[in-house]
Amino acid sequence: MDGSTDPAQDDSGPFGRPLFDKPSARALSRVGVVDVGSNSVRLVVFDGAARSPAYFYNEKIMCALGAGMSETGKLNPEGRKRALDALRRFKLLGDGMGTGPLVTVATAAVRDAEDGPGFRAEVEAKTGIRLWVIDGKEEARLSAQGVLLGWPGSYGLVCDIGGSSMELAEIDNGEVGKRMSSSLGPLKLRDLKGGKKNRKAVIRETLSEMQSALGEQKNRLFLVGGSWRAIAKIDMERRGYPLQVLHEYRMTPKSVRETAKYIQENDLDELRNRAGVSSARMALVPYAAEVLREVVKTFKPRDIAISSYGIREGLLYEQMPQQLRDRDPLIEACRFAESKDARIPGFGKVVYEFIQPIFKSAKPDRRRIIKAACLLHDVSWRAHPDYRAEDCFDNATRANLGGLKHSERVYLGLALLHRYSNKREDTRFEDLTGLIEDKDAHEAEVLGKALRFAAMLWLKEDAKLGEMRWYPKKKKLELRLSKEAAPLFGEVAESRFMSLADALGAEAIVKTARG
């Protein structure tokens, strides 16, 4: 292949092995993906829900294959040895986990090196892994598709930085448009002669050419790649940001400028320790920060989002039929969690329909979070009763859930916390509530108390035993119970219903059908 063929059309390439038994399958068979980059070699094993696969296993080895290539034209000898050792290990791990043949792709370093073909031959001879090299435009396309895995229907500019290259790809309404590749990787910039002044000139000239080709890109900028994630960690440390989740972390053009300056002014060893960045990655961060500052200055995005999804997720997205791509990754992940961990799979739908009258004026974006809470409301039942509320909050705010802004994570976490606890004061989560507005925190509390009450009444998936009616202007919450449901409305259930009404500031009314 070596960049000369579109791998999507190459049956012998990494896309030749279908990831699903059937196009309509909802469960993803376990699959291993290896990305041989210029700086790192990583194995990810996916498992779980087809639309939002779980990270069954994830390991990265910093090899720096591309270090020194600007001078020698060849792969870094030490990096080559480390990469080969990593691939041997990954092959054995994949065999042990039952992934089948590993889907293995290589990017800029192997693509550009004089000894790239020899390295590929050595890898296949010593490990049995066939290494597929993709060109820059294909790398950009797959990274953009990785972003679409987490943000279906998104639009904006995807910027993927590796060790030896940086790619740009536009996305619009779920489709990848124009895409370009450049040599603005931090390993190459570090080896560039002429110091900071020359680097700045090269970066500006390259980005100017890319802007001329791509046109105006003032929507969202999606950042993909380890160096961008390291900069985001430093931005979090600088701001004292309380939620240490990189995916969907938002930055502004101003914060990029301030963090780039912060990196310049601080001791790198001290900074990496505070921000939790590896020493190998931190060595490249100053060069990446120079690039990011100019990318933002050149394209002037309206906002900036960190994506933990990239080329590896793009390999999975490539195989998805369109009807699967169109599904909501958050809801699919929650459905999978419910089917795997809830006591009564399918009960979440019953709960959603029961509590919906309270949220009938909610907008679609909020309604999907409410639905997610209903699906997740019982997945932590195995936790110790004293810690269920905390477990629910942690699951929502830190779990691998796509399609969630940080404010939505906190909203979902608060709702699930209140599923098991009436109060959230004096918990270790108080500092996170500052990420959402007071009215949203209150609505999350109402949602949680609605879930807490609903869980008391029904014991089967298809139960139709009653309904709630909410009259917001009159401030009345009415519960209508069928004759069969009346015995379920005991003291604890009544207490939880009253707590829900109190959270709404409403009068509680209970009616029971006669028969």
Image (spheres, rainbow, N blue to C red):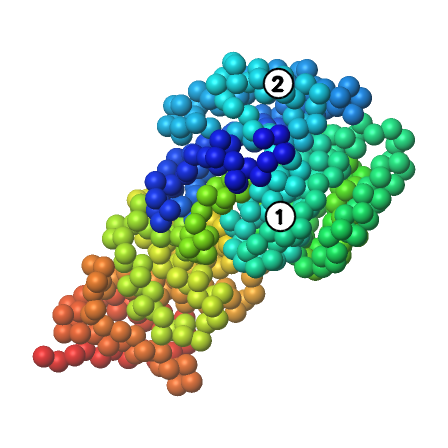
Image x and y of residue 68, in percent: 76, 22
Residue type beneath disc 1:
Ile
Q: Is residue 297 above or below residue 197?
A: below
Q: Nearer the viewer, mark 1 or mark 2?
A: 2
Q: Name the residue rendered at 50%, 44% in the picture.
A: 318
Quarter holding the C terminus?
bottom left
Q: What element carries label 2?
A: helix
Residue at the spot of label 2: 119
Quarter holding the N terminus?
top right
Residue type beneath disc 2:
Phe
Answer with mark 1 or mark 2, whichever residue precedes in sequence: 2
Q: Is mark 1 on a helix, strand or loop?
A: strand
Q: Is residue 488 above or below residue 45?
A: below
Q: Name the residue rendered at 61%, 40% in the picture.
A: 138
- Would residue 305 be seen by someone viewing this image from the given angle? no
Q: Name the residue rendered at 38%, 41% in the picture.
A: 20
C-alpha gap between disc 1 and disc 2: 32 Å
Image x and y of residue 487, in percent: 15, 68
- Would residue 482 be seen by someone viewing this image from the given angle? yes
Q: How dense is the environment of label 1, judged by Cα within 10 Å: few (below 14), some, or many (20 and up)?
A: many
Residue at the spot of label 1: 306
